[in-house]
Image (cartoon, rainbow, N blue to C red):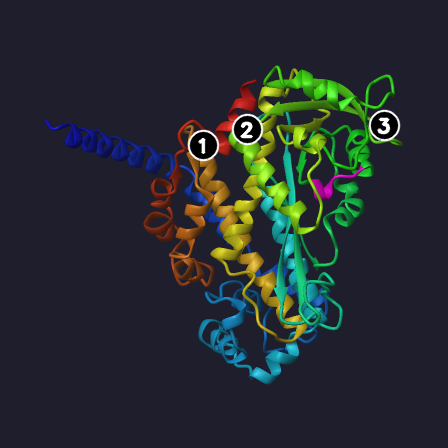
C-alpha cells in the first residue's frame, strides 16, 4: 500500500474509533446536558424577577418576561442590524405577542435594564452551581481577569465616557470579565464606562479574592493594595513585575539589578526571594527568565520605535532588561518551579481568545446609536446568549478532557453560529433537546478537538502538567 494511502487509512480508523468512543461517553451525559439547557432560563423565576425589578407591574401586560428575554437573547443579527420592527416581528412569530414598535420602545427603560442584569446574575449563579467535577490541582481555581473595550456612537450624556483623546463625541464601554480556567466558570461580568480603568476595578473588587485561588492578571490590574489583599486572603498571585514597584532584598536593601541580571545571563532561570514596593514590602519570589535573541531584537525594535516617536532614547539599563521576562509570585517553588512560571502565566492569554469570540463571532462590539436602555438591554441579551453557549462549550470540553484532549475555543464558537437557529428552536420548545443533541451538538466533539502546535502545549495540557507536578 502506498505510504500516503496507509496514513490516510490509519487516520480514518482512528477518527472512527474516536467517534464511537465519544458518542458512547457523550450519551451517558445526555440527560445532564439536556437539564443544562432546560434550566438555563426558567419562565417562572423570570416573571418573579420582572415583578421585583418593576419591569412587569400588571398581570395584563402584553410583553411577558420570558418572551422579552428570548427575543433579545437569540437574535442572530448584531445589535447594529436589529430594528424595532424586527423585534416586534420576532415577538409576534415566536411568542404570539402583539406589540407596536412605539410600545416596545417605551419598554426599554431602567426597569428593563435592572431586570436583565438580575437575569444575567442568576444565570451566572446557576452556571456555577451546575458545573462540577473540575480537575484537582494545587489551586481550586485559577482566576483570570481582563477587560475589553469598544466604541459607542455617543457617550449617552456622560454615562459611557471614553478617553479624552479617543473622541470628543463617541463614548466607550468596557466589559470587565473574570473566569476560572480550571472549571470554565464565568465568575463575574460587568458593563462599565470606558474611562473606568483596570486599576480602579481592582481597588473596588478586592473583596472577591478568596483563599487558595491563583490570580493571573495583566499589569493594568496590579497594585500594592491588590497584592496585599491577595496575601491577606491567603490566596496566590502570578504576574509580571510592575515597572513602578520597588524591589528590595529580604534585608530591606534596594535590589542591585546590574548584579542580578549579570547573574541571570549565565542561566536560563534565576529566582530570588524579595520584598515588593517601598511601603507595603510584600514578600514574594522574583523569577527572571532569559528570552531568545529573536525575541530580544523584536522588543528592542518596538522600544526604539516608541522612544523615537516621543523624542526619547532607549537607555542601556532598559536594553539590558529587555533580554529577560521578569515575574513575581507568592507561590512556592515546590508547587510552581521557575521553569513552569512562564507557561502558567501564559494561560492568561486564554481570555484574549474569549474576547475574540465575543467580537468576531457574536458581534458584541457592532452597535448603532439607539436609546441608552435599549443598547444596554440588547447587550445584556447577547451576553446571556454567549453564556449559554459557553456553558455548552465548558461541558463539551469536560467530556473530551476524559480522553486527554481539549476543545478549541475558536473552533467551537465558530461552529456555534451554525447551530444558533436550531438551539433557538430548542429554547422555544419547538425542537426536541435529545434530537438536537444527537444530530447537531454531538458532531462538535469530533470537529472541535484541537491539537497543539508542534513543540507547544494546549492550555489543558499545561493544567495537567501543573496537576501532576
Across and down, in percent, residue 17 comes to: 27, 31
- Residue 348 lies left or right of residue 201; in this view the side is left
- Residue 344 lies left or right of residue 314; in this view the side is left
Q: Disc 1 versus disc 2: distance between alpha carbons?
A: 10 Å
Please determine whether, in this image, residue 279 is positioned above or below residue 288.
below
Mark 2 = which residue? 135
Classify mark 2: residues with Cα within 10 Å, few (<14), some (14-19) or many (20+). some
Classify mark 1: residues with Cα within 10 Å, few (<14), some (14-19) or many (20+). some
Mark sitting earlier along the chain (3/1): 3
**Residue nearest the viewer, comparing 357 with 162:** 162
Indicate the secondary structure of the residue bearing disc 3: loop
Q: Disc 2 versus disc 3: distance between alpha carbons?
A: 34 Å
Q: Are marks 3 and 1 in contact (CB under 8 Å)?
A: no
Mark 1 = which residue? 401
Q: Residue sitting at 72 percent across and 19 percent down? A: 260
Please determine whether, in this image, residue 251 is positioned above or below residue 235.
above
Locate the N terminus and report the quarter of the image it occupies. Answer: top left
Locate the C terminus and report the quarter of the image it occupies. Answer: top right
Overall secondary structure of the magenta section: helix
Q: Is residue 243 magenta?
A: no
Q: Is residue 182 visible?
A: no
Q: Is residue 222 magenta?
A: yes
Q: Residue sitting at 71 percent across and 27 percent down? A: 329
For residue 281, the mark is 3
Give the residues drawn in magenta, as a range: 219-223
Across and down, in percent, residue 306 comes to: 65, 47
Instruction: Locate residue 276: give its quadrant.
Output: top right
Q: Residue furthest left?
A: 1
Q: Disc 3 versus disc 1: distance between alpha carbons?
A: 41 Å
Q: Is residue 118 visible?
A: yes
**Residue nearest the viewer, comparing 410 with 41:** 410
Classify mark 3: residues with Cα within 10 Å, few (<14), some (14-19) or many (20+). some
Amino acid at each position: 500500500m502506498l505510504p500516503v494511502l496507509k496514513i490516510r487509512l490509519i487516520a480514518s480508523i482512528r477518527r472512527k474509533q474516536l467517534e464511537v468512543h465519544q458518542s458512547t461517553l457523550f450519551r451517558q451525559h445526555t440527560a445532564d446536558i439536556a437539564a443544562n439547557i432546560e434550566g438555563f432560563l426558567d419562565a417562572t423565576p423570570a416573571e418573579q424577577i420582572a415583578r421585583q425589578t418593576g419591569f412587569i407591574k400588571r398581570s395584563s401586560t402584553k410583553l411577558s418576561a420570558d418572551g422579552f428575554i428570548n427575543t433579545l437573547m437569540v437574535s442572530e443579527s448584531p445589535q447594529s442590524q436589529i430594528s424595532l420592527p424586527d423585534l416586534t416581528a420576532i415577538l409576534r412569530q415566536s411568542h404570539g405577542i402583539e406589540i407596536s414598535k412605539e410600545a416596545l420602545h417605551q419598554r426599554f427603560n431602567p426597569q428593563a435594564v435592572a431586570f436583565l442584569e438580575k437575569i444575567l446574575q442568576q444565570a451566572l449563579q446557576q452556571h456555577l452551581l451546575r458545573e462540577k467535577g473540575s480537575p484537582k490541582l494545587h489551586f481550586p481555581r485559577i482566576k483570570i481577569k481582563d477587560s475589553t473595550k469598544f466604541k459607542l456612537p455617543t457617550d449617552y450624556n456622560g454615562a459611557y465616557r471614553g478617553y479624552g483623546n479617543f473622541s470628543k463625541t463617541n463614548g466607550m464601554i468596557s466589559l470587565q470579565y473574570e473566569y476560572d480556567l480550571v472549571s470554565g466558570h464565568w465568575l463575574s461580568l460587568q458593563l462599565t464606562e470606558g474611562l473606568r480603568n483596570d486599576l480602579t476595578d481592582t481597588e473596588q473588587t478586592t473583596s472577591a479574592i478568596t483563599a487558595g485561588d491563583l490570580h493571573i492578571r495583566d499589569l493594568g490590574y496590579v497594585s500594592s493594595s491588590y497584592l496585599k489583599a491577595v496575601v491577606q486572603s491567603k490566596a496566590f498571585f502570578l504576574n509580571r513585575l510592575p515597572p513602578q514597584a520597588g524591589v528590595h532584598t529580604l534585608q530591606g536593601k534596594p535590589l542591585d539589578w546590574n548584579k542580578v541580571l549579570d547573574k541571570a545571563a549565565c542561566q536560563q532561570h534565576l529566582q530570588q526571594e524579595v520584598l515588593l514596593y517601598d511601603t507595603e514590602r510584600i514578600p514574594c519570589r522574583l523569577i527572571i527568565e532569559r528570552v531568545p535573541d529573536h525575541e530580544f531584537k523584536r522588543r528592542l525594535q518596538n522600544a526604539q520605535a516608541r522612544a523615537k516617536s516621543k523624542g526619547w532614547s532607549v537607555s542601556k539599563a532598559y536594553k539590558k532588561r529587555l533580554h529577560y521576562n521578569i515575574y513575581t509570585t507568592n507561590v512556592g517553588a515546590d508547587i510552581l518551579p521557575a521553569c513552569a512560571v512562564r507557561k502558567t502565566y501564559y494561560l492568561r492569554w486564554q481570555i484574549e481568545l474569549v474576547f475574540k469570540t465575543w467580537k468576531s463571532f457574536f458581534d458584541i462590539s457592532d452597535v448603532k446609536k439607539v436609546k441608552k436602555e435599549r443598547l444596554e438591554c440588547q447587550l445584556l441579551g447577547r451576553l446571556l446568549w454567549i453564556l449559554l453557549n459557553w456553558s455548552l462549550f465548558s461541558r463539551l470540553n469536560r467530556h473530551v478532557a476524559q480522553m486527554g484532549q481539549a476543545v478549541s475555543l475558536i473552533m467551537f464558537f465558530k461552529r456555534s453560529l451554525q447551530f444558533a437557529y436550531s438551539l433557538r428552536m430548542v429554547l422555544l420548545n419547538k425542537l426536541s433537546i435529545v434530537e438536537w443533541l444527537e444530530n447537531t451538538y454531538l458532531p462538535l466533539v469530533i470537529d472541535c478537538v484541537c491539537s497543539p502546535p508542534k513543540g507547544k502545549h494546549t492550555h489543558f495540557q499545561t493544567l495537567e502538567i501543573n496537576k501532576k507536578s
